[in-house]
Image (cartoon, helix red, strand yellow):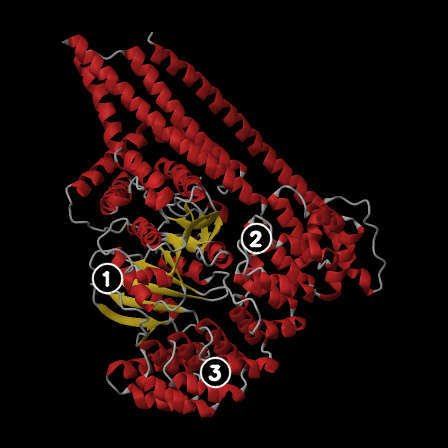
């Protein structure tokens, strides 16, 4: 027997042992899992009435004692928490505080394992624990992206406006927090965050400006309309900020913005800003915007033309009449008008009530 | 003379064995690395912020593009699953790519399609004539393009891209069923790392044999056909753990055309899908990586190791052969087109790791493996085969392959264990063993044929896979006895 053959036989023996070990481990997991699942299901079923009793406690019924209950109760409560609001949510939050789960999560925020830090942050967010805001803010600089995101989401749920500045600042640092996560966290903070968002539109963090403008629009903050009009009118501002301001003005729906939006649509400028302004005019629905949209439909670039056509479609009969007048034209203007009218027709068909079947 | 021949044959056999062991060891490394990532991800389960993403008005909208050619068997299930996505804002663009069956009629009846004037958002070249564009009147965000086929899926995809309106586009096969949170899961990397992520892919699994109702996989089951079971193991290895491992190394080469999400602006920037590629999904990923790396722009291809997309796999050797020849042909085209990237440090892990791996093991693999088999046969025919050595070689190769398959099934069992049924585990383990005996050799033959077509520059022809379709749970009064494609376990 050659050396190569001998080595091969030895390697085969090791491989065979590994295969057998894997097979045994897999079989044990397979049989054990079904048993574990059945046991957990049984325990959950036993604990469900207790959770119901906890929810009913604020309706004049005494809260049951849960100090010595199964740890699975915590899991059940944590699962249920994001789906609840108001008194029910407060009742279950109190249970988690009472059972020491919140304190334990506070300790876990400094765990060496990333997923433990992330899960702890998630839990603290769900219980809206204001006590741990500084630790959560510190986690915004965590080396693991998932942990930073979990901390940002949690800060949004705590309802503490002190989190606004660190969240916005997190957009500028590297590695930072994604705008989508920060945006949602700021939306979660609600209207108390509005003053900070208004300040951020002209604030020192450039990355925060477009997001702040967009969020003011999503909040529908009428108090920000003048500020956003100024931003949109300022041609020296970054197009991305002007675009967000235009979209926000459309969402706020204030006719005070119409003149600036009309000017943006009809004046040559960055395409993305013109498109956003045209869309905003459609959302606001101020008749003073009809002329500008019609003009954009006739002369604008392809994207602006489409946006103007869709906005005219949103205007109701007046916009529809203008689209119909242009739909007979050949070329891109006619095509954009016809496309918008067809979309309207398809939507109208969808809204039509189903035909009533008459029995023979 | 005979001595020299024996020595030559032995040397050849040991070389081939070394190659096979190296290939399986490299794959095992990928699988173990992917398995570790999958296990790590499972720990985050429930804390990923999916509800947050779903509720967010800042989550980017998605255009789901579905090219379809003769897909009457399953198109309604695919559309029901796609339209039932738990995602804040999306549209579906279905392309009837010259269907000769009732695909269009079925969709028209189900969704009350009405012709509309198209609102094109891009002007990528499309060879097949656009015949008409239709929109659903049922309130569903569904648009259907009817076009003449030119026998290329990429042409249909480009037509759909020209109509897509949203910043992200999802490529979806017309025979695939998405899980309700599929879009949310694959879009998450775009929300969390919008500056870097350019593509994101999800796991593809074999749906044949599963219990399905109106596009929803109620109970994933293994098919009773061994060919399908073997592919189930193969998909777990390559499409779940392999790709997770590659993505971890920042060297993901393929995001499956069956289910992948990309930034629309970048797709338009590189000119859409390659019109002549048979592996347009891999081609797109490599083109994007090459383009962005050359320009020094940030880019990251992500793989989401969650069970998200169920697809029909071939049930017969004939159909399997056609599919694998096409894949191999496409891989050959891809490697030739991007030959400058192979081994080139300028392209990072893709150039130094992924492309050399695909060249050495995926493209050349069938040549070496079949050469090894031929050399054994020649030696046996000449009477110079050392049966003892041959036994040792075959045993070692089989054991490495079996360890690989067993590891894959073990990871599945410890993590997702999605396939139900009492005997699914034993069937998967047996399929993993059978994969090494018979399937692997026939597969190598198909791949060799595909490679030959690529080397000889044969005109690529895209042939649609015959579909069996998804049967409904309501087709049978006893759901426990219902099975979809090919019968359940």
Q: Residue at x 42, y 30 (%)?
A: B404
Where is residue B166? Give x, y as percent. 40, 67
Q: Quadrant of residue B133?
A: bottom left
Is residue B347 in view from this perspective? yes
- Side (left or right) of A267 relative to A137: left
User: Which residue lies under the disc numbered 3?
Assistant: A233
Q: Nearer the viewer, mark 2 or mark 3?
A: 3
Name the chain under label 3: A
Residue under numbered circle 2: B48
Q: Is residue B227 above or below residue B197?
A: above
Specify the farthest residue to the top. A1
B241 relative to B79, above or below:
above
C-alpha span from label 2 to label 3: 40 Å
Q: Which secondary structure, mark 2?
A: loop
The kind of secondary structure element at disc 3 is helix
Badge 2 and badge 1 both on one subunit: yes
Point out which mark residue B98 bears: 1
Q: Chain of mark 2?
A: B
Q: Is residue A47 left or right of residue B27?
A: right
State the separation of the CA atoms marked 2 and 1: 41 Å
């Amino acid at each position: 027997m050659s050396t190569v053959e001998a080595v091969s036989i030895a390697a085969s023996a090791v491989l065979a042992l590994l295969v057998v070990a894997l097979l045994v481990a897999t079989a044990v997991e397979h049989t054990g899992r079904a048993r574990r699942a059945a046991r957990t299901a049984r325990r959950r079923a036993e604990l469900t009435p207790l959770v119901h009793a906890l929810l009913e406690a604020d309706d004049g019924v005494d809260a049951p004692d849960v100090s010595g209950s199964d740890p699975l109760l915590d899991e059940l409560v944590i699962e249920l928490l994001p789906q609840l609001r108001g008194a029910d949510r407060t009742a279950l939050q109190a249970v988690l505080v009472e059972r020491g789960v919140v304190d334990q999560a506070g300790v876990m925020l400094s765990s060496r394992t990333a997923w433990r830090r992330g899960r702890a942050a998630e839990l603290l967010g769900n219980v809206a624990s204001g006590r741990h805001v500084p630790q959560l803010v510190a986690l915004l600089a965590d080396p693991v992206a998932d942990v930073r995101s979990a901390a940002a989401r949690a800060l949004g749920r705590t309802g503490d406006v002190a989190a606004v500045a660190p969240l916005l600042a997190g957009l500028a640092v590297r590695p930072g927090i994604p705008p989508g996560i920060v945006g949602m966290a700021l939306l979660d903070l609600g209207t108390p965050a509005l003053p900070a968002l208004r300040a951020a539109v002209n604030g020192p963090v450039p990355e925060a400006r477009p997001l702040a403008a967009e969020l003011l629009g999503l909040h529908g903050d009428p108090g920000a309309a003048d500020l956003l009009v100024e931003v949109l009118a300022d041609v020296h501002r970054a197009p991305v900020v002007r675009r967000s301001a235009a979209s926000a003005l459309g969402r706020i729906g204030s006719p005070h913005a119409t003149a600036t939006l009309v000017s943006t649509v009809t004046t040559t400028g960055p395409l993305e800003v013109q498109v956003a302004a045209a869309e905003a005019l459609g959302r606001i629905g101020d008749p003073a915007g009809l002329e500008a949209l019609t003009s954009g439909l006739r002369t604008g670039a392809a994207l602006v033309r489409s946006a103007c056509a869709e906005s005219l479609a949103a205007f109701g009969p007046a916009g529809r009449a203008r689209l119909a007048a242009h739909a007979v034209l050949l070329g891109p203007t006619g095509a954009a008008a016809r496309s918008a009218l067809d979309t309207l027709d398809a939507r109208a068909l969808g809204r039509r009530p189903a035909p009533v079947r008459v029995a023979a | 003379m005979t001595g020299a021949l024996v020595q030559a044959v032995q040397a050849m056999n040991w070389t081939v064995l070394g190659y096979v062991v190296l290939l399986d060891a490299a794959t095992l490394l990928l699988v173990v690395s992917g398995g570790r990532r999958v296990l790590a991800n499972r720990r985050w389960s429930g804390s990923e912020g999916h509800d947050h993403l779903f509720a967010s008005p800042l989550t980017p909208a998605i255009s789901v593009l579905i090219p379809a050619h003769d897909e009457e068997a399953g198109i309604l299930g695919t559309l029901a699953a796609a339209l039932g996505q738990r995602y804040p804002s999306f549209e579906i663009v279905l392309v009837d790519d010259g269907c000769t069956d009732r695909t269009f009629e079925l969709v028209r009846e189900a969704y009350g399609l009405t012709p509309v004037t198209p609102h094109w958002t891009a002007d990528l070249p499309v060879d097949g004539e656009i015949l008409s564009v239709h929109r659903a009147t049922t309130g569903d965000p569904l648009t259907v393009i009817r076009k003449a086929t030119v026998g290329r899926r990429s042409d249909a995809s480009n037509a759909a891209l020209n109509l897509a309106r949203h910043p992200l586009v999802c490529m979806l096969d017309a025979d695939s069923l998405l899980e309700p949170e599929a879009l949310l899961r694959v879009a998450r990397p775009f929300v969390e790392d919008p500056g870097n992520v350019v593509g994101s892919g999800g796991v593809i699994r074999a749906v044949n044999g599963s219990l399905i109702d109106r596009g929803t996989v109620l109970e994933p089951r293994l098919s009773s056909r061994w060919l399908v079971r073997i592919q189930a193991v193969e998909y777990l290895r390559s499409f779940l753990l392999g790709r997770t491992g590659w993505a971890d190394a920042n060297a993901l080469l393929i995001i499956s055309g069956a289910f992948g999400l990309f930034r629309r602006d970048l797709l338009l920037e590189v000119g859409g899908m390659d019109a002549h590629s048979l592996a347009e999904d891999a081609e797109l990923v490599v083109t994007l990586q090459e383009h962005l790396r050359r320009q020094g722009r940030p880019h990251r291809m992500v793989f989401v190791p969650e069970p998200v997309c169920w697809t029909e796999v071939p049930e017969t050797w004939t159909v399997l052969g056609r599919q694998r020849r096409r894949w191999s042909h496409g891989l050959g085209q891809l490697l030739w087109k991007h030959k400058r990237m192979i081994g080139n440090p300028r392209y990072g892990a893709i150039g130094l790791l992924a492309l050399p791996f695909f060249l050495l093991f995926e493209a050349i693999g069938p040549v070496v493996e079949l050469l090894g088999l031929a050399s054994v046969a020649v030696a046996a025919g000449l009477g110079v085969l050392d049966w003892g050595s041959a036994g040792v070689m075959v045993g070692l190769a089989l054991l490495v392959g079996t360890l690989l398959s067993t590891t894959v099934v073990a990871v599945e069992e410890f993590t997702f264990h999605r396939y139900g049924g009492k005997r699914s585990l034993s069937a998967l383990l047996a399929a993993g063993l059978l994969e090494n005996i018979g399937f692997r050799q026939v597969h190598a033959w198909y791949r060799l044929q595909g490679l030959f077509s690529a080397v000889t520059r044969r005109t690529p022809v895209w042939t649609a896979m015959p579909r069996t379709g998804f049967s409904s749970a309501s087709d049978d009064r006893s759901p426990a006895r219902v099975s979809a494609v090919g019968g359940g376990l």
